[in-house]
Amino acid sequence: MFRRGLILFFLCSLSAIGRAQGTPDDTIKIDTRLVSVPVVVSDRNGRYIPNLTRDDFTILQDGVPQRIDFFATNEEPLTVALLIDTSQSTRPVLDDIKDSARSLVKLLRPSDRAMIVAFDYTTHVLSTLTSDTRELRKAIDQAEIPRGIVGTTLREAAYQTVENTFRPIKGRKAVIILTDGKDFGSRIAADDLLHSLEESDTMVYSVMFQTDERNSFRRTTFSERGIYGRRFPPRNPATLRRIERMAQMNRKAEEYLRQMADLTAGRFYASTDGRLKEVFESIIKELRLQYRLGFYPPEDKAQGAFHEIKVKVTRPEMVVRARNGYRAEN
């Protein structure tokens, strides 16, 4: 009995020493877990604001100010995952997307790491995290649409990337998702992915391109040409219902992609084609210019509870983007 008590005392002492000597960036669960908060600050014209200090920021959890235990402004290596939708609906724009993805690789520095993931009826890790740009370009070349197999496991690909690869990684990290937003076949529920993102400090940038509705309408109007080649709006009720269903699916998909981006302090982009070079340039620049703040939250007895985060800056006329909350880990 005495020996067991001695062992417990020794382990508790080690834990206390670890908390005292560890860096603020260490991630420990529950009350000793540092909550990492990536923050982007810009003016109202979208220009990023550099050279802010710790004293310029205030972090609130559930409306209560918290002490900022960690603050970093120096440029750190980036960790980026590029998730490419290779389902059947991306066929019209996939070549442009791949060209844009190659331009993203050119923006990476030797110290940065990236991975390429394709998803359709399943998830394909085409390249694990690497700084080798040749390997990344080769992986992009391998992103192809499968023949005759339908499915879009968007949530599964995002969940696996965040949980299996990004969770233990510290620093500036982001998942960039290129998709039409519609998910068919994922075993991960929509809320489960959002909860995973609430427990993570990974930023999500979602780029939505709409192809189905536009191309379907073109096919419809072409098949219903009037005399002399003039086009008329489709009058077939079944066709109209199909177009409306597609519009509803696109609206729901966009809402979810925006939710992922807003939850993590990322951004949502809409694209009608796959030419995304300027989008990628903006994302990489933003990642390099972000501030990283962190705080140790008060003890939370309600494991799994969601806590709202709000970040403020003392300077006027500034626009602040930060994750809007976190979920206490179970």
Image (tube, helix red, strand yellow):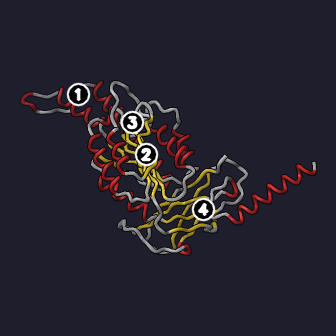
Q: Which mark's residue is nearer the viewer, 3 or 2?
A: 2
Label 1 CA crowd tier, 10 Å (few <14, some 14–19, many 20+)? few
Q: Which mark's residue is nearer the viewer, 1 or 2?
A: 2
- Local secondary structure at mark 1: loop
Contact between marks 1 and 2 (CB within 8 A): the answer is no
- Local secondary structure at mark 3: helix
Contact between marks 1 and 4 (CB within 8 A): the answer is no
Task: Where is residue 135? Give x, y as percent.
Answer: 37, 46
Residue 25's disc is 4
**How far apart, in angstroms, are the residues tagged by discs 4 and 2?**
29 Å
Report the residue marked by disc 1.
235
Label 4 CA crowd tier, 10 Å (few <14, some 14–19, many 20+)? some
Compare marks 4 and 2 and give the one earlier in the sequence.
4
Q: Which mark's residue is nearer the viewer, 3 or 1?
A: 3
Q: Which mark's residue is nearer the viewer, 4 or 3?
A: 4
**How far apart, in angstroms, are the residues tagged by discs 1 and 4?**
61 Å
Compare marks 4 and 3 and give the one earlier in the sequence.
4
Q: Which mark's residue is nearer the viewer, 4 or 2?
A: 4
Report the residue marked by disc 3.
249
Contact between marks 3 and 2 (CB within 8 A): the answer is no
**How far apart, in angstroms, are the residues tagged by discs 1 and 2?**
32 Å
Task: Looking at this view, name the residue that lies furthest to the right.
Answer: 2
- Choose between 284 and 48: the one closer to the eye: 284
**How far apart, in angstroms, are the residues tagged by discs 3 and 1?**
21 Å
- Local secondary structure at mark 4: loop
Report the residue marked by disc 2.
257
Tell me what residue is drawn at x 36 percent, y 40 percent: 180
